[in-house]
Amino acid sequence: MNFVDNPGKLRGFEKSIKVEKVSRRSILKGLGITGGFVLAAPVMSRQAFAYETGAGKMPHGVVVDPRVFVSVAPDGIVTILAHRSEMGTGVRTSLPLIVAEEMEADWSRVKVQQAHGDEVKFGNQDTDGSRSTRHYLIPMRQIGASARTMLEQAAAKRWGVPATEVKAVNHEVVHSASGRKLGFGELAADAAKESVPSIEGLKLKDPKDFRYLTKGQVGIVDLHDITTGKARYGADVRLPGMKYAVIARPPVTGGKLVSFDPAEAMKVSGVEKVMEVRGWPWPSKFQPLGGVAVIARNTGAAIKGRDALKLVWDDGPNGKYDSVAYRKELEEASRKPGLVLRKEGDADAALKGADKVIVGEYYIPHLAHVSMEPPVAVADVKGDKAEIWAPVQSPGGTREDVAKTLGIPEQNVTVNVTLLGGGFGRKSKCDFALEAALLSKELGAPVKVQWTREDDLHNGFLHTVSVERIEAGLDKSGKVIAWRHRSVAPSIASTFAAGTVHQAPFEIGMGLVDMPFEIANISCENPEAAAHTRIGWFRSVSNIPRAFAVQSMVGEIAQATGRDQKETLLALIGSPRIVKPAVKDLWNYGEPFDSYPIDTARLRKVVELVAEKGEWGRQVPKGHGLGIAVHRSFVSYIATIVEVAIDDKGKLTVPRVDTAIDCGTYVNPERIASQIEGAAIMGLSLAKYGEITFKDGKVQQKNYDDFQVIRMDESPLVTNVYIVPPGPDTPPSGVGEPGVPPFAPALINAIFAATGKRIRSLPIGKQLEA
Amino acid sequence: MIKVKINGQEQSWDGDPDLPLLWFLRDEAGLTGTKFGCGQALCGACTVIVDKEAVRACITSINDVAGREITTIEGLHPNGDHPVQKAWRQVDVPQCGFCQAGQIMQAAALLMDNPKPSHEQIREAMSGNICRCGCYQRIENAVHLASTGV
């Protein structure tokens, strides 16, 4: 891993901090630590920073209050709540680290405690959309600064000196004039009696004094537990008297159980019960699909019992879903005009008058998340109360859905968030927790519902399948004068509303209508596509097909004009400017456009940086090729160069990957690097192997043997990451997802450079072997 | 009655002899460090060491390991300071961490067999263990570090 020299500067936060005044009285409401400094009473922070984010518009907004997030015990241990879910991004470390930094806590004396699902208390907890740092950098700094101020005030009172004369330094408050010092623990009880300072008056640390932020020196809090087997994931929860369950679900989305025979299953040693699970009609949102549950004394017996069930299903309206036929439908739809979403100039006329028209029709199939930990949840329902332990990305949403499903009040539901063994969007949907809740209610005992890998593939919420057709019109000089992009794909909205045939605003805003090129005539269209399976969010979502198509087309234009890929890309991006697409209510990842514009200067910068550091244009051996791609997503800018090597049998390897990311102001460069390294692997997986296919309504893949992902022997030999130093006032932006989209097109452009073969259909599979 | 020794402790089982070792470890013995990822020996998340060999617990029945000595992640080192574990922490390998117990057990078995593997040998030996987060570069470096002294 390589970093661009750390800027060490996070300027601009101290300016224009404004928030409405809220009366704050000391309400002692605990985290269970007695005798300490325990704070409560939520305070909303809106527009409190130099820049505005979309955080306040998320359900339940942001809570900025040290009483909710911080406690100090008399022994000095500072406990900080992590209210977002940890699925590998490092957020369970990064957000508490921000609080610790601002409050001058010594990280070695900080304990991180996972918050349960309660958005009224903690603010929005939905850990997806690459939002955590983006939405919480400033609120967490304010929380830390509030706690620090209260400790300083308590010390000043104790010594009878003005608060301005004391300062918190490394877990104690010091009065330098007299040399007196008091540890945080000694001040805890007094600090708890201090009123919470107004956010307006808070003094945030000067970034040059940061000890932890931007340094990348702090390991994740779960590192030791992970390496010793102590880390607790959803499947690791064990309760006294707990039963183990697996469920046979309808093999076709929208299918129903007709009948079942439990006799053989009941003969399996360890099986205790076979029972029907309630299902919801399609589109079923996050509700369970229903089926038959086998309850046993351990998971192995439950699986064996399920194998022995005799089941009869009615496949319902999607029983004919067939990937080969559906692809043809999408291709045909892409060749006809569709709903026009962005229109600038007259693309139709410009294409007709163009000297040359390049057409690329790109296919990107369904993909499955296959997080290493398949969906799993434990529920204990007693009367009108429910407690859940689950690896969920949205604990607040899970709480709400469990309450609705069981018909009990939300305050009677406790959702404990375990570590997530990967999420990638799958665990934003809490169907597995709802299944456990339904079973526990009926059995009157705690239940663990374990999905097998086959269940995960057969009954998931898949990434959409799409045809992206781009027509680029060139004038005699080779300049692109027309751009028509038709994107055809079933929408995630189809999982919520029957009859959905168009993409939702949050999907069209992912690389279709926000296309940043400087072209006079643009048409972005969305022909209709109906869904025949559950479609859901998959890491970086619609940016995968869009970046693949757009950045492949850049390669095709370079190819057609005989120009360098990078120069062609920069020419298309055009002058440094703010792009304002002619789109009504442009969706900008939920962020205000003023704080997070489409800035081509930043887009150019990552291209130039990766080209410089990644030695674009270097001589590579025969059979090797370089490809480049850039994409803005989750309001971050990422460019990737891939070096590929293809041997004479068509075997593909990746000797080197270079990626530059501009994610604005950042917290932990070390975890940014790990996310980008991982994104290259995920990008390579989907490009080389990723494909879920349907026949007779059923997913044809079963496990990691036929839905392959990259293993170590095929992984890139070296992945280098370069982080753009943020400018003053640059708001933080996404990291978890944006690394994925540019990888596949950079790889495909590299394959063209190496072999002269242009791949337009993913996965690559055996296409190079022909 | 099947008897096995797990992390130095005698354990017995009088249920289904075909029960996969994985579910015995996790659900019956309460050793949840060994993970379920695929059930078909495709991902390596359930890797344990039987005598001196890395074994996939998901396709190994409890009967298959009768009378043998099993080491799980919990028993690799009393303080979690096996060179592989230390190297893992030094290189900050994990993202979500779910596959890492299996990766560490596989790496520990590799180093028992070949104390100084080349990078190519590491990549080959570790290829049965999937990491969906994509920590391979760091896993490779951590195994190398463990083999050269942490």
Image (spheres, rainbow, N blue to C red):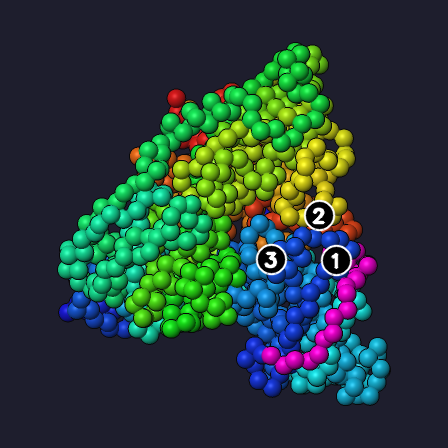
| Badge 1 vs badge 3, beta-carbon distance below 8 Å | no
Q: Residue at x 70, y 74 (%)?
A: A147
Q: Nearer the viewer, mark 3 or mark 2?
A: 3
> At numbered mark 1, what does the secondary structure look like: helix, strand or loop?
loop
The Cα atoms of the two marked residues, 3 and 2, are separated by 16 Å
Which quadrant of the figure contains the C terminus of chain A? top left
Chain bearing tag 2 is A
Residue A295 position within the rendered picture, expressed as x and y whole percent measured from the top left = 26, 62
Q: CA distance from mark 2 to mark 1?
A: 11 Å
Q: Secondary structure at mark 3?
A: loop
The image's mark for residue A59 is: 3
- The secondary structure type at the circle numbered 2 is loop
Q: Is residue A685 above or below residue A558?
A: below
> For mark 3, does the 10 Å Cα neighbourhood hold few (<14), some (14 to 19), or many (20 or more) residues?
some
Magenta stretch: residue A105 in it?
Answer: no
Q: Answer few, some or many: residues within 10 Å of disc 1's Cα (few below 14, many 20 plus, some between 14 and 19).
A: some
Asked if the residue at tag 1 contacts the one at tag 2, i.e. Cβ–Cβ closer than 8 Å, the answer is no
From this viewpoint, is residue A155 visible? yes
